[in-house]
Amino acid sequence: MVPEIEKYLNNEMSAEARQKFESDLAADPVLRQELEAQQQLIKDLRRMAIARKTKSVQGLRASKKKAKRLAAWAFFGIFLLGGTVWWLSRDGSMDKKPEIEKQAQPKNGPSPGENQPPVLEKTVPPGTENLPKNLPEKQPTKIGTQPIAEKPTRPKTAPQILPGGENKLLSIAKSQYVRPSEYANLRSTGDDDVLKSAKIAFSEERFGDALALIDISKPGEPQFLYGHILFAKANYFLAYQTFSALADDKNHSEWKENAEWFALLSGLASPPGRVPKTVLDSLLEKMLDDAGHPFRVKKALKLKEMMNHE
Amino acid sequence: MANMIAQLLPGLRNRFSTKEALTEGLQKIENAAIEHLMAKSEGMVRKIARTFGLPEALADDVLHDGTIILIEKIQDGTYHSELSAPQTYLVAICRNLLANHSRLKRPPATEQIENVLDLADNSFVEMLEFRERRVVLEKLLAQIGPACASLIALRYLDGYSDEEQLAQKLAPFSSPESLRVSRGRCMKKLSEMAKSFKF
């Protein structure tokens, strides 16, 4: 009934379905209560979305204002400094000018042509004598007229890309990922519950069906299976988040070690930069330090070796 | 002068110079529209806050809350742009919110403030309640787990339709129906968690 409530609240129902739902509502006080609760939640979530945007715009405006104020102060400071320098130099030149002028003027200045520096004859490089003489000379570079050269960009520490287009960490993660054996070759016994049906669908690689069956709001095994479906569908970052949350879930500590291992692999496979390397390193070190960790000897040590090798 | 330049160079004209365009931008919660609206109304809201003897920081909060109320009113169709421009409407909302804040600050309120109040409008109380609920909701979204949190956020916080989520592979589902079923379960769980907080 829950998707119906959402459809009803989002006006996604046909007129007929809407009418039927409204008659159900009139007859069922529990459904009515649930509808009201969901309505309030959706209203709050939508309001939260607007509030987040408004807050970010306000923050942006505040930083723009701050930058403008800073620029104005900087301009004022430069103007003040420039003015002071000009004023001081003006005062100094007024006092000193007559003396300088006096010193600069020789009592008996040389007559024209006398003591003039010798005019150097233009030397013509050999082989260029016959070139046209009226070629424009190379002009000095005027500051401010040249386009600003782009800053040389430092190459980012991009992940190493393999010829197939995959980065190496993803390749390592995929090579180390093995689906849990309990999800392999499952067969229907006719009286399967929903979770088992989801597991069968997963083992048969019918991921869409598995997703439709699984209840992702439930912690524990449904989360674990959901993480694997996400990994299989190459949604590595969400798989990392799902496994990490399960590993941290103290109420379902039976999944902790498994979830840690798959969180590590999903984290490695995630798009570069999504999961900080330090987080993954510490997760791996934690596994290696735990002598009783089931993934320590066969998996984590090998993974570390492979990562070191890379 | 500015109008003349804008007429001569249409490229320089603001996208939200007409109230219809601004209303449309706000309905879609476009950042540029919100920024334009805030820039137009901020000075007036601050001035009103000063006349009520309220601090400037509160004017910012009220402008934020007022913008949310206005956008909601645009989205649910209770705001009509032919009656007043969005910025005028926002200033009116903020005036009411500030009057309420002022009344809270000084219980023996002056008659002038009472006259300003639109007692039929419960936006002020709603916003105060929403502030409290928002804090709880943020906590619950962090507790519900990444699988549910991402499904809820994609639909209600980021505003992606189910079809967009599937087309852009934002959610791992293969049909809108299975996506809705899963999100529905998550919403039910969130609602149950919220009940424990007496939401």
Image (tube, coloured by chain):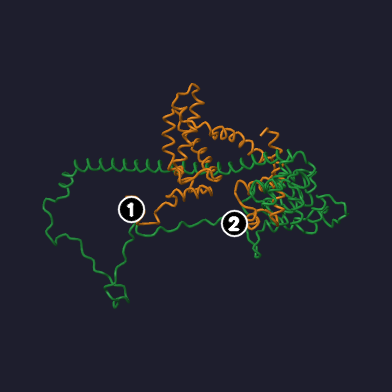
Chain colours: A green, B orange
How many angstroms separate mark 1 from mark 2 (CA)? 51 Å
Which residue sits at x=44%, y=44%?
Answer: B85
Q: SS class of the residue under badge 2?
A: loop
Say which of marks 1 and 2 sits in front. Answer: 1
What percent of the width, then of the height, locates residue A35? 69, 41
The answer to whether residue B14 is above or below residue A89 is below
What's the residue type where badge 1 is placed? Met
Which of A307 and A59 lies nearest the eye of the viewer? Answer: A59
Parent chain of label 2:
A
Left or right, A220 with reference to A139: right
The residue positioned farthest toward the top in the image shown: B108
Q: Position of residue A50 (x, y in %)?
A: 55, 43
Q: Residues within 10 Å of mark 2 (few under 14, many from 20)?
A: few
- In which quadrant of the rendered image does the C terminus of chain A lie? bottom right
**Which corner quadrant of the image does residue A149 belong to?**
bottom left
Residue at the image point whose x is 65% and y is 41% from the top:
A39
**Residue at image point 16% right, 44% down:** A98
- Depth check, front residue: B127 or B154: B127
Q: In this view, does B119 lie above or below A49?
A: above
Q: How crowded is mark 1: few (under 14 residues within 10 Å), some or many (20 or more)?
A: few
Q: Can residue A186 be seen in this view?
A: yes
Q: Are marks 1 and 2 in contact (CB under 8 Å)?
A: no
Q: Residue A212, percent across and down?
A: 75, 53
Q: Which residue bears the numbered disc 2?
A: A158
Point out which mark residue B4 bears: 1
Q: Nearer the viewer, residue B7 or A56?
A: B7
- Same chain under badges 1 and 2? The reply is no
Q: Can residue A284 be seen in this view?
A: no
Q: What residue type is labelled 2?
A: Ala
Chain letter for mark 1, please.
B
